[in-house]
Amino acid sequence: GTLTLYQRLQPCHGSSDNRGPLWSCSDALVDGLHRELLRPRGVSLRVAVSYTYRAHWDVRGFESERERRWWGPKIEAAREGIRVFAAAEKDGVTLDALNAEDWAFLVSLCDEDVARDYAAAFGRGGEVESRGCGVFTAPAVVHRRAMDAFVAAEIRRHSRASGPAANGPAT
C-alpha cells in the first residue's frame, strides 16, 4: 500500500529557519519514515503538497544584494529537497502536487456544508453556484486549479534539473 502525507508546504531541506540549516524534513521523511519504517513493511510513501515554498523563488526579484545573499542558499536548499524526493522515487517515494482526488478526500473529512459547497463549486454537484457555506467561490476554484498545476510543474522542473543554472538563479 501507500501512505499519503498531506502537507501545506513542501518538506524543508535546510531551507527553513524552524530547526536550523542542518535539519532536513525531506531527509527525515525519505530516510527515517520511508526507508526505516515503511519500506521494510512493503509500504510506499507519497507526500502531496499544496505549495512549493521557496523552490520557485528567483533572487532577481529581491531588491538588495543582501537579500539575494540571504535567500539564495535557502532557495537552492528547497530545490535540493525536491531532488531528494526525485532520487528516492525508484524506492517508492513520491512528492506530488495535490490533485482533484486529494482535494475530494480532504473535503470528505470536513463538515457537510463544506462538502456540498465543494461539490457544487468543483462541478460534482451539477450546479456552478454553491448551495453550501460559500467557501468555494468561482475565483477560488480557478485559483486552486491554477496553483495545483503550478506546483506540479515546479516539482517536475526541480526534480529533473540540477543546480541553480538549471532552475533559474537562486544566488
Image (spheres, rainbow, N blue to C red):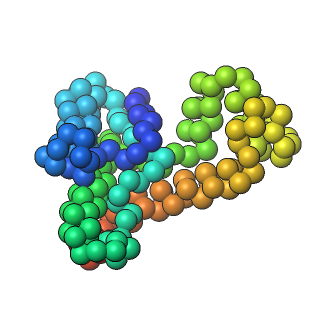
Query: Which residue sits at x=81%, y=39%?
Result: 130
Residue 51 point in image, percent of width and height:
45, 51
From the viewer's perspective, tell me whether residue 84 is left or right of residue 168.
left
Q: At 35% across and 58% down in the image, what residue appears?
A: 54
The answer to whether 134 is drawn above or below residue 87 in the figure is: above
> Which is more toward the observer, 41 or 158?
158
Instruction: Judge left or right: residue 22 versus residue 43.
Output: left
Viewport quadrant of the C terminus: bottom left
Quarter of the N terminus within the rendering: top left
Where residue 30 sits, quadrant-wise, is top left
Image quadrant assignment for residue 92: top left
Q: Is residue 148 above or below residue 116?
A: below
Residue 41 coordinates in the image, percent (x, y): 28, 24
Looking at the image, residue 157 lies above or below residue 103: below
Who's the residue at 55% across and 56% down the image?
A: 147
Residue at (76% x, 43% y) in the render: 121
Q: How many marks?
A: 0
